[in-house]
Each structure stands twice: as C-alpha cells, then as structure tokens.
Amino acid sequence: MYLKAPTGCDKYIPYIEKITLGIIAAMDVLVVGSGGREHALAWKLKQSPRIGKLYIAPGNGGTSTLGENVPIGQMEFEKLAQFAQEKKVGLTVVGPDDPLVGGIVDVFKARGLRIWGPSREAAQIEGSKAFSKQFMHEAKIPTAEFAVFSNAALALAHVRVKGAPIVIKASGLSLGKGVYVCRDLTEAERAITEIMVERVHNDAGNEVVIEEYLDGPEISIHALTDGYSHILFPASQDHKPIGDGDVGENTGGMGTIAPVPWVTPEMMSSVEGQIVTPTFEALKKNGIQFQGLLYPGLKVTLGGLEVLEYNARFGDPETQVYMRLLKTDLLDLLEASVDGTIDALRTKIEWHRGFAANIVIASGGYPGEYKKELPITGIEDAEKVEGVVTFHAGTKIENGQVVTAGGRVLGVSAIGGTLKQALDRAYEAVGEIYFEGMYFRRDIGAKSLSA
Ligand code: AMP
Ligand code: GLY
C-alpha cells in the first residue's frame, strides 16, 4: 500500500516505511450531510490509512457506526465552522447541494479552515437553472433549447406556442422534484400553476425554465477538479422516476449502476471534449474558480450528447456505486482537489474491475408523503450476500433499533464481475430487508443489461 508523499516531496513512500518512520499524521475529517451519499463518502474515508477521527454532521443511522454523529444541521455554517475549529478538523467534506449553494465553503475559508467543495459563486452552476442554461448557451455547450420566465401568464403563453412534449423546471433547488416532464399541454399548464401560482417549491419557483423535450438514455458524469486540472470518473447511470419503466414522478434517484456498459471510450472522449473541458474553460473565463466535483447530467440523443443540468457535488446515489469501485484513497483525492495537486493523480487513480449497482429502498408514498419511525429489519442478513454493502440514507437509531427517518431510506449496493452479477447480488440482498410499506424499483440497470 502506498501513500501520497507530504507536500514538496515528489515520490511515493511505502506505507509500512512511513509507519516505521512515524511520519503518518492522522487527520480528523468532518463530513457534512445526512444522506446515502454521505454514508458512502464516510465509509470510503474510513478506509484511508491516514484517517483519524471521523465526524458526520448531522449523519444518519449508518454513519453513527463509522464515526461520531454531530447534532449540527447542514445549514448551520457558523456552528459547523466553530466545531471544526475546536476539534482541529483537518478537512471538512461537504456532500449536499444546499450548503454549497448557501456558501458553507466561503464561511469556512473566511475562518482559514480547510474545506472540500465549490464556493457559493461556483455552486451557482447548480443552484440556479436559469444561470446554468445561460452559461451553457454562452459557452456553446450542447443543451436543450430553452426560455426563462418569472411571470406565469407569459410562461403559459410560451408553452401554448411550443406545444408538448415539453419540460418545465423550477429554477432553484428542490430536492430533484422541481422538474416536470409534460406529455401534453394540460400537464404543462398544471406544472406552471404548481410552481408559480401554488408555489409548491417556494422561492425555487420564482423563475421557471421551459425547455425542449430530449429523448434518449441518461448518464451521470463526475469530474473531480482543483480548478486547474480534472479527473474524469467512469460514467454512471441513475434512475430518477419513481416507477419501473421510468414512469411517474421524479425523485432524488432510485438506483444506480457504474460503469455503464454501453458507454464506449469514444463516447467518453466526446464527454470530455464537448462538455467537461469546455465547461471548466468557460468557468475560468467567467472568473469562477471551481474546486470540487462537477457532475453534469447528460442525455444521449440521436443528435449527440446534451447537458440536462449541472450539479456541483457528488451524485446521490451515484456516490454509492463510485465508492464501491474506487481503489484509490478518497482522502488523497479530496485533498488534491483542495490543494491544487489533481494533475499529479490523474494517471494514478485506480478503480476496481467489474461493476457496481445500488438499489434505493424508499418509504411507501415517496416522493409524496410517507410514514416515519418504522422499524427496519434484515440489514445484517442483506450484508451477508457476497459483495454487498448497505448504505443508510433516511434512517436513525432509536433504542438500538434502526428506524426509517426519510423518503429514501437505504441504498443496497453490490459489486460483481459483470453488471448482471452486481444487480443479482444487490436484489438478493434487498429481499432480506423489510419495513412496512417499503418500495424499490425492480428494473435498475435492466435497460443496460439488454443494450
Ligand atoms: P434535472 O434535475 O434538470 O436533471 O431533471 C431531472 C430529470 O428530468 C432528468 O434526469 C430527466 O429525466 C428529466 N429531464 C430534464 N430535462 C429534460 C429534457 N429537456 N428532456 C427530457 N427529460 C428531461
Ligand atoms: N442522482 C441525482 C442527483 O444526485 O441529483
């Protein structure tokens, strides 16, 4: 096992040698967030030979088994910074979009604290769809034709002219639920009324983006950057609608696979050349320093690749499959992103061979209303299935019992030599888990198996 050498030293020193020399400094890390993504990040960070104490704020039932859950909310920036300062945390890692868009990184940096993630200014690329569509338009990055409205009557007039199918999006953050793919005009009118008149997404609906409907499969792209250079991860694929066959309401994501078997190296070159590199160049040209993870969601259409949206963070549940496949120490990668040394790791990053799948188990009723505090059984039996790790999302532990505490409850991940093996293992493990009303999609990865 090898470790990154201390800054200023160009060669890798064997880990055992470093222990003997007593030069391994353990680093305490704080992970901000409480979802499956944060459990997966904490799970991988815990494996770093350099990890000291691991704190997760506020964390969930699963993260409490890896480190110390800290009862501070993800939007309580001053309290989080105070905690990091008091505990001499060496690196804070931010999972979710809300604190990034809200400026957590700026608050930490103002206090001289080391934090991984983009600044508030850079996170706008996710925080405002109106901003990101304009950015893509100016940078000539392929994306659906669009118009932005802050007036409901004008928005309605526009959809009547354009006709259906058409896509209506609340511009701000709305937990992945502010996007309406409308098959007819009645649906489109209903979406505009919900967003702009009934204001079901609150201020996120101050503006709507109305865009052309794009047909084709979707892929998730992840590029880790220090603002100068970047590392492109293999493509992954989420399944956002609640129902099998991609029907029903959009969710935060119901299941992922990686790598996507039909995404060829040529397609990845196009992703790099047409989307990732031009995006980073345009950010720089606009004077925006982006340090962190850029995750463009893409549609693969007959006419080529199109960007659906940018995210300024790791995907959830994409992270769950990436962390199962990543061989390299995550702490090394995140520190390189903070320290501006990504270029040195570009050719050194290693992935396990094979595939990973992650099946999300949600509360019955999600993405609408659902019950909480329901006891969950079978997690230990699920993890007895070869290659399986269960990541918690909306869970907490009450009197020693894991109970539900959110919409997306668990992510059951598995690795396998083939995609089919990974999926079979993950579904076998899902079969061991039970809570009242639990719901999961039964077709995660199915289209890629038959592609
Ligand atoms: P977004 O949050 O913008 O990625 O949208 C959520 C989901 O809505 C995407 O994953 C797509 O499934 C769907 N979607 C968004 N924009 C479009 C579009 N222009 N055409 C077709 N589907 C779309
Ligand atoms: N995979 C969906 C998201 O993270 O937004």
Image (cartoon, rainbow, N blue to C red):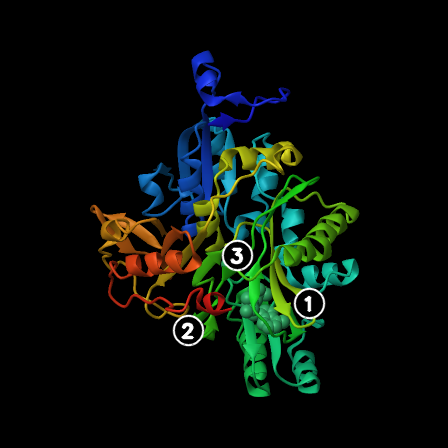
Find out whether the residues at labels 3 and 2 contact each other: C-beta distance under 8 Å. Answer: no
Q: Mark 2 points at which residue?
A: 243
Residue with the mark numbered 3: 236
- Indicate the amino acid at tag 1: Gly
The residue under the point 44% across, 19% down is 16
Badge 3 vs badge 1, beta-carbon distance below 8 Å: no
The x and y percentages for residue 65 are 31, 40
Q: Position of residue 75 (x, y in %)?
A: 49, 47
Give SS at disc 1.
strand
3D distance between C-alphas at marks 3 and 1: 18 Å
Q: Which of marks 3 and 1 is nearer the N terminus?
A: 3
Of residue 4 and residue 297, the one placed in the foreground of this image is 4
- Could you tell me the amino acid type at mark 3? Ser
Marks 3 and 2, how far apart in space? 19 Å
Who comes first in sequence, dot 3 or dot 2?
3
As drawn, the residue found furthest toward the top would be 21
Foreground label between 1 and 2 = 1
Residue 196 in view here: yes
Numbered tag placed on residue 304 in the rendering: 1
Residue 429 locus on image (x, y percent): 29, 57
- Where disc 2 sits, the SS reads strand
The disc labelled 2 sits on which kind of residue? Gly
Does residue 109 appear anywhere in the picture?
Answer: no
Quarter of the image for residue 248 reads: bottom left
- Confirm or reject: label 3 Cβ below 8 Å from ligand 2: no
Binning the other alpha carbons within 10 Å of mark 2 as few (below 14), some (14 to 19) or many (20 upward) gives: some
Relative to 402, is 100 on the left or the right? Answer: right
